[in-house]
Structure formats: structure tokens, C-alpha cells
Image (tube, grey):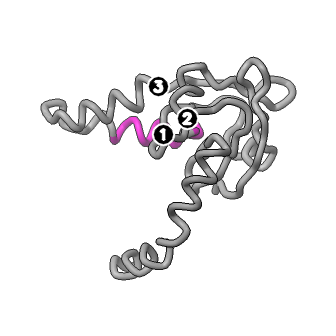
């Protein structure tokens, strides 16, 4: 399971260190793609394959389904760690997530999210007051 929050800086080439805790789960090669909420998603190969199967089953005739599949697959890249445990975030993905210098990597169960530090702080300021209400709604759903 992927969990935790880690702050790192991107180097001049757009590389960032993958925390050691995450390396065990991801291995040497994994998938990075556009995420929701202005962040990036990183998936282990096995999780990406499961998600890919589900996305391919969406009806091609539905506009929303086509848009969602395009969103995830067009931005997806397979990346590998270098000897220092860093990986390159492609420029198009850095732009999508407004990543410039400071990044936050968070474990979210089956994926990692990569946020610009500013976006992460902003998101937390917005969501924190609502967490209790969200928890109540989820409790009603049996979670």
C-alpha cells in the first residue's frame, strides 16, 4: 500500500527523487500520467494494467468516456529510476501539474500523486474544513 507525504525539489532537468518507501512498491519502472485536481498520478505497472483494462471497456460511443480515456492515455509515460532514485517528469506533465521547483509526493493507496507544493497547500486549505462532512457522507455509504 502506498501512503505518506514527502516533499522534494525538482532539479533543472525536471527530475525528482522517488522516496525509498515508494520504490519498494513501484520497482524500477512505472507509469506517470495526468491526474485529477491538478496533480499527476503514478501507478505501479500492475495497477496501470488493471486500470487500462477498465478504461478500454468504456463505451466508445460515449463522449465522456472517450474524453476520459484520452486524458489518461495521452499523458501517460513509462518512466524509470536512475541510479540516484530519481525519475524525469516530462515537460507536458510538469506543465499540467504546475510543477516548477517544489513537489509533494503522496501515497494514496494504489497510486502516488505528485503535486506542486503551492497547489497541495491550496488544496489542503480548501478541503480541510469539509473533511467532517465528507466523512459523514461516506459513513452513509457504509465506509
- Relative to residue 117, is residue 141 depicted above or below? below
Left or right of 26, for residue 123 = left
Residue 54, position as x, y percentages in the image: 34, 42
Reading the image, the residue beneath label 3 is: 75
SS for callout 2: loop
Say the numbered circle drawn on residue 97: 2
Image point (52%, 72%), residue name: 129
Tags 2 and 1 in contact by the CB under 8 Å rule? yes
Residue that lies at the very extreme toward the left in this rendered image: 61
Judging from the image, what secondary structure is the residue with disc 3 in? helix
Magenta residue span:
42-54
- From the image, tell me which residue sits under label 1: 35
Quadrant of the snapshot with the N terminus: bottom right
| Above or below, comparing residue 29 to residue 120 in the picture | above
Q: Is residue 52 magenta?
A: yes
Q: Residue at x 78, y 29 (%)?
A: 86
Mark 2 vs mark 3: which is more N-terminal? 3
Mark 3 or mark 1: name the one nearer the start of the chain.
Answer: 1
**Depth check, front residue: 135 or 45:** 135
Q: CA distance from mark 2 to mark 1?
A: 8 Å
| Quarter of the image that includes the C terminus | bottom left
**Most common secondary structure along the magenta stretch:** helix
Amino acid at each position: 500500500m502506498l501512503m505518506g507525504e514527502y516533499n522534494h525539489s525538482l532539479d533543472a532537468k525536471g527530475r525528482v527523487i522517488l522516496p525509498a518507501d515508494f520504490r519498494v512498491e513501484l520497482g524500477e519502472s512505472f507509469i506517470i500520467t495526468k491526474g485529477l485536481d491538478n496533480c499527476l498520478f503514478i501507478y505501479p505497472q500492475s495497477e496501470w494494467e488493471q486500470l487500462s483494462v477498465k478504461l478500454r471497456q468504456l463505451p466508445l460511443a460515449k463522449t465522456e468516456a472517450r474524453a476520459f480515456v484520452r486524458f489518461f492515455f495521452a499523458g501517460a509515460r513509462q518512466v524509470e529510476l536512475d541510479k540516484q532514485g530519481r525519475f524525469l517528469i516530462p515537460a507536458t506533465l510538469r506543465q499540467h501539474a504546475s510543477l516548477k521547483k517544489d513537489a509533494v509526493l503522496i501515497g494514496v493507496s494504489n497510486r502516488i500523486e505528485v503535486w506542486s507544493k503551492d497547489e497541495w497547500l491550496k488544496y489542503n486549505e480548501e478541503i480541510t474544513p469539509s473533511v467532517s462532512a465528507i466523512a459523514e457522507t461516506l459513513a452513509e455509504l457504509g465506509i
